[in-house]
Image: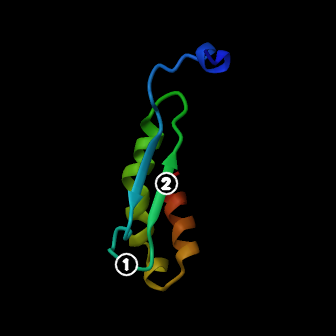
Amino acid sequence: SNHFFSALSFRSMEDRSIVLPFAVDTSPKFAMYGVFDGHGGDSAATLAQRSLPQNIVDHPLWAQGDTVGAIRAGFKRVD
């Protein structure tokens, strides 16, 4: 058996993920994939999973074509 993995104790999976092939607004140009790492609980990862995609596409910068700016703003809002 692999000693490294057998020495670790995994109580629960705290990570969350999303796969949105056409983003939230069904734009054919974008897809969103994310893995949100939970540390000491899943609350922050779950919050990001549930709200980050919508925060990004709802930001005015998204409609203006500033994808990077909208992503940054979406992360700041979740934070």
**Residue tagged by mark 1?**
27
Q: Residue at x 51, y 36 (%)?
A: 38
Quarter of the figure with the N terminus: top right
**Left or right: 23, with 74 as reference point:** left
Colouring style: rainbow
Element class at badge 2: strand
In the rendered view, would you say 11 is above or below 55? Answer: above
Q: Kindly identify the residue that appears in the image at 57 percent across and 73 percent down.
A: 69
**Residue at x-position 37% and y-position 71%:** 22
Query: What percent of the width, then of the height, locates residue 57?
Result: 41, 71
Q: Residue at x 46, y 33 (%)?
A: 14
Q: Quadrant of residue 23?
A: bottom left
User: Residue placed farthest to the front in the image?
Assistant: 1
Q: Give the camera-side residue of 53 and 31.
A: 31
Tell me the SS state at disc 1.
loop
Residue position for label 2? 34
Q: CA distance from mark 2 to mark 1?
A: 17 Å
Point out residue 18 in the picture as x, y percentages from the top left corner. 41, 53
The residue type indicated by label 2 comes to: Gly
Q: Are marks 2 and 1 in contact (CB under 8 Å)?
A: no
Question: Who is closer to the viewer here, 37 or 54?
Answer: 37
The residue closer to the viewer here, 32 or 40, is 32
Residue 49 screen position, x and y as percent:
41, 50
Q: Is residue 39 left or right of residue 16?
A: right
